[in-house]
């Protein structure tokens, strides 16, 4: 069977990649540093892993899939870490259950930092000795993209840890998204029917789920110029959105009943405040709504008489929305921000960053999709069932990490991520 090779974003030498390796690894450690040791051990829900687990798992990824795979006589630092830090690689062996990661008091945070240092030394030595080994460079690039994904998860999960705490602490009190006195008027941008090309081509780094690039037919449609705001979502609530079964998919309605959902995750009961990584703040009506499930996004769209975009419609529009700039982690706001009032309304706004945008597309393989070879084939392909695609990155996505072909995916009931809504219409 033909497999896709791992390719790097641009031809990198070992030296350049070593530099990127140091930067990415230091960034992960510095994101964790803002938390106390106690914060780093807690797991508030199954989806949100403890910070220290992210620190260990990303390190294990390099040890297991780079050092052990590429060095014949490599002796693992501690082979029990295979069980502790394996996330979901069945071909590697048994693993500690995901929902119980918060029960692991050992290894300690300090021991995990020592583990990181050991692996960093070994990895950088390997890169220095084989800096023309394209397959090695490709594996390291994958490991770094994987680590960037976990940097995002570290912040997302830390938010849930602190949100669950009645002491009302912030991750970073100085993280404040700008506020706005008004919303950009909601407009729909027309797109005629036609073929489009989506997916990553064979150059540059991309995950296997983004390939191969292929044609898709789009019917005429239009996409909202901006994201749905807190104010608009609040109107949906006030209008009885959570009490109107006709608006909901059957599974969504069941969950609303079972879990008692009546507002987005992280909103106060009075709908006036929301929890942010900067702490509790007054709800900004002009900022994008976030922490909503696919079910809530679909119900909101039904309430407005519209629908969610397909991932192909989204990507087609996003290909024109370059460069990839927006409210990513690099703004330091760590929270979605209102669309700039002076923006040209004919353009799609808030494409990059702010919130991952739910798409009306099941997470499925593209035509002629081939997973990576070996254990890394478990990275994406096996999750292509019962999940939905989300696009565009969020306010905690590392800069340089997303692109128009980037496919994130979540279960329809997931709300802990920075997930929001862009509307679309049939014509
Ligand atoms: Fe992972």
Image (cartoon, rainbow, N blue to C red):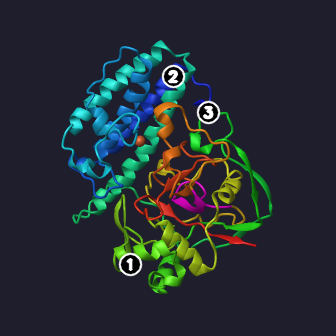
Alpha carbon separation for disc pair 2 and 1: 50 Å
* Tag 2–tag 3 contact (CB < 8 Å): no
Whereabouts is ligand 1, in terms of quadrant? top left
Residue, x 42% and y 75% (percent of image)?
Answer: 254
Q: Position of residue 232 (x, y in %)?
A: 53, 77
Task: Check residue 350 for magenta coloring.
Answer: yes
Left or right of 201? Residue 387 is: left
User: Neighbour class for label 3 at 10 Å: few (<14), some, many (≥20)?
Assistant: some
- Residue 23 versus residue 267 in the image, above or below: above
User: Neighbour class for label 2 at 10 Å: few (<14), some, many (≥20)?
Assistant: many
Alpha carbon separation for disc pair 2 and 3: 15 Å
Left or right of 239? Residue 311 is: right
Give the number of callouts.
3
> Which of the labelled discs sits on residue 136, or is there none?
2
Alpha carbon separation for disc pair 1 and 3: 44 Å
> Which of the labelled discs sits on residue 4, or is there none?
3
Q: Position of residue 306 (x, y in %)?
A: 64, 75
In the rendered image, the quadrant that contains the C terminus is bottom right
Q: Is residue 63 visible?
A: yes
> Which of the labelled discs sits on residue 257, or is there none?
1
Residue, x 33% and y 59% (percent of image)?
Answer: 160
Front disc: 2 or 1? 1
N-term-proximal mark, 2 vs 1: 2
């Amino acid at each position: 069977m033909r497999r896709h090779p791992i390719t790097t974003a641009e031809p990198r030498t070992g030296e350049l990649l070593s530099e990127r390796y140091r930067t990415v690894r230091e960034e992960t450690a510095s994101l964790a540093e803002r938390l106390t040791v106690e914060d780093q051990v807690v797991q508030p829900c199954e989806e949100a892993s403890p910070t220290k687990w992210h620190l260990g798992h990303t390190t294990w990824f390099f040890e297991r899939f780079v050092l052990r795979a590429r060095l014949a006589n490599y002796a693992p630092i501690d082979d029990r870490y295979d069980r502790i830090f394996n996330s979901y690689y069945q071909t590697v062996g048994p693993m500690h259950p995901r929902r119980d990661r918060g029960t692991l008091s050992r290894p300690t945070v300090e021991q995990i930092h020592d583990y990181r240092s050991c692996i960093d030394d070994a990895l950088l030595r390997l890169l220095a000795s084989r800096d023309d080994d394209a397959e090695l460079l490709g594996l390291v690039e994958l490991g770094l993209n994987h680590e960037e994904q976990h940097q995002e998860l570290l912040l997302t999960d830390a938010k849930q840890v602190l949100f669950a705490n009645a002491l009302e602490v912030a991750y970073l009190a100085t993280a404040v998204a700008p506020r706005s006195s008004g919303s950009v008027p909601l407009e729909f941008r027309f797109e005629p029917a036609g073929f489009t090309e989506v997916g990553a081509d064979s150059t540059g780094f991309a995950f296997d789920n983004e390939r191969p690039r292929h044609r898709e037919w789009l019917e005429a449609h239009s996409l909202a110029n901006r994201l749905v705001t807190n104010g608009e979502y609040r109107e949906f609530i006030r209008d009885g959105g959570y009490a109107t079964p006709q608006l909901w998919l059957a599974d969504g309605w069941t969950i609303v009943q079972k879990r008692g959902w009546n507002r987005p995750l992280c909103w106060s009961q009075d709908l006036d405040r929301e929890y942010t990584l900067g702490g509790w703040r007054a709800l900004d009506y002009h900022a994008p709504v976030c922490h909503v499930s696919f079910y809530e996004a679909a119900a909101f769209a039904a309430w407005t008489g519209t629908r969610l975009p397909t991932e192909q419609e989204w990507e087609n529009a996003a290909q024109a929305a370059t460069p990839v700039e927006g409210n990513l982690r690099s703004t330091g706001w760590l929270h979605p921000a209102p669309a700039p009032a002076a923006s040209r309304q004919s353009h799609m706004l808030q494409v990059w960053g702010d919130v991952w945008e739910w798409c009306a597309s099941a997470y499925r393989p593209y035509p002629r999709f081939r997973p990576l070879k070996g254990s890394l084939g478990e990275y994406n392909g096996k999750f292509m069932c019962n999940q939905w695609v989300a696009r565009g990155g969020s306010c905690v996505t590392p800069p340089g990490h997303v692109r128009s072909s980037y496919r994130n995916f979540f279960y329809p009931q997931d709300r802990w991520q920075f997930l929001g809504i862009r509307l679309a219409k049939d014509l």
